[in-house]
Image: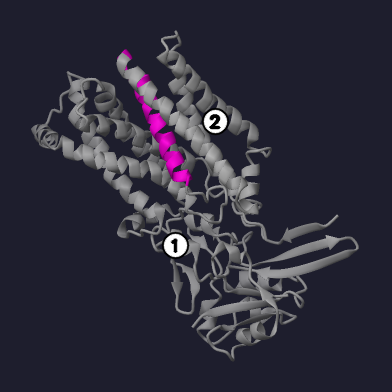
Amino acid sequence: MREEIIVSGRNNPLIDPHLEIWEWQIPSYLFLGGLAAGILFFASLYTLMKKEKQYKTAVEIAPLITPFLLVLGLFFLFLDLKHQLYFWRLYLTIKLESPMSWGAWVLMVITPLSFIWSAIHIESVFPKWDWKFDIVKEIIVFFRKYKTEMAWVMVVSSVILGIYTGILLSAFNARPLWNTSILGPLFLTSGLSTGAAAIILMSKSHTERLALAKIDLILIAVEIFFIIHMFMGFRASTQVQIEASNLFLGGEFTAVFWIFVMGLGLVIPAILEIMELKNKKVPYMVAPILVIVGGLIFRFIMVHAGQISRWLY
Amino acid sequence: MRYAMAVDTKKCVGCSDCVVACQTENNVPIGYCRDWVVEVTDGTYPQLELELRSERCNHCENAPCVRCCPTGASHIVDGGIVKVNENKCIGCGACIQSCPYDARFSHPKGYVDKCTFCDHRVKDGLDPACVAVCPTKCMYFGDLDDPNSEVSKVIKKRKHKTLIPEAGTIPHLYFLI
């Protein structure tokens, strides 16, 4: 039997035997970024469609958590840096070839926007809210006048944020599992789906929940299609990508991926949402919780499996 | 000017002198290395073939690490040497993820570290430490644009390969086979 044995003298920490340079911080951030992007997308979309009344949770309530999600995500990103005191270097340059660079800038646009959006809506959610200082009230009155303009910026920047979480990974040609251009749309769809799920969880209006469940169902279907499409692409590609897909088709991530992401994270919530739309009695919280947890696990698996996939030479 | 290196896999004995020379010359932290030796055994017993390669950063012409760096810390200097500016590096790990050769590592001080082709020696007209110390003289260093340089001459004469050329990186590390 022909055999090839490769012995390397290299044993650099976090590099060998396979990369572990990105731990829990990056997948957690990718999840939080996608979730915030999803919520802000629906908030700005329904504002632009002038449906604020029917979608009060999507436009006014759910966005209140996005500043926390984004700040926590940014904090995780900061924790991931190994030369932390130099983080400001990110904001001295824009490098369009580096997704991480323009992603960092998009965060600098959407994070302040999420704060302003929350500030102009907080009084309608908490009627007793008092800003105490007149200057703050004046600033909020000012921003209220430009709500439509803000919604336009937000709808675009939330899509960029959502898709960038995938493009960030797909730009690495050295990691065959990530190196597929479908990853951007896949992460965007997953982010929008978790965003819709979060709105469903917070909504008290049955009609709003049903409308978002319908949207979430479509997003789940698209996501399942993208995942199958991604694996079809891998199977039809070069040896390194065939081996990358083997991690999920018989390899070490098979069980965790197909049970927790495909099964509990996509198929089961889709079935529950179909039942709900057909007026069957199901607890409405189960499907969105499964979608959100599935989205989180999906990002952890993709980041870890990607660092195991590699070129062989 | 395009610096390049050729490693003769037929002459290399895998002694790892190049590794120790680099660690000493560049004060590489203990437990890390910027260059390393790979042994590949291939074939059906008893017809086995052994290839020994002293590997390091390939100083790619189309360097994915430079492309992915969000701050411009990873850059290409005169002569095509890929370097990291420690004071611009935030330690995000993007370049480490982007390198198909896994030639970079995270220095304990936080920034990313890698082979520099010993540019501090090269600018004084010396060879990189690994090349200079090799007991079998299996490594050649020089300017690809100069037809009379050691590396240009040996590449012209000998059959050679680069590692993962299909990754599109245009590596500048040649292996004579």
Horizontal arrangement in the rendering, residue A4 relative to residue A226 (left or right): right
Q: Nearer the viewer, residue A285 or B117?
A: A285
Query: On the image, which quarter does residue B132 sit in?
Result: bottom right
The picture quadrant where one finds residue B135 is bottom right
Kindly state the secondary structure of the residue where label 2 is placed: helix
Marks 2 and 1, how far apart at CA: 32 Å
Q: Residue at (55%, 76%) from the top-left corner?
A: B118
Q: Residue lying farthest bottom?
A: B148
| Residue drawn at 48 percent across, 22 percent down | A270
In this rendering, does residue A111 appear at all? Answer: no
**Can you give x and y, in whole percent of width and height, for residue A116 in the image?**
21, 36
Q: Amino acid at mark 2?
A: Val
User: Which element type, helix, strand or loop, lies under badge 1?
Assistant: helix
Which numbered circle lies on residue A153? none
* Residue B79 locus on image (x, y percent): 48, 79
- Is residue A188 part of the magenta span, yes or no? yes
In the rendered structure, which segment of residues is drawn in magenta? A182-206
Residue A261's tag is: 2
Mark 1 — on which chain does it sit?
B
Q: Residue furthest right?
A: B46
Quadrant of the rendering where the C terminus of chain B is positioned: bottom right
Which residue in the protein does label 1 denote? B67
Where is residue B161 drawn, in percent x and y? 66, 72
Q: Residue furthest top?
A: A281
Prevailing secondary structure of the magenta residues: helix
Q: Is residue A36 magenta?
A: no
Q: Badge 2 sits on which subunit?
A: A
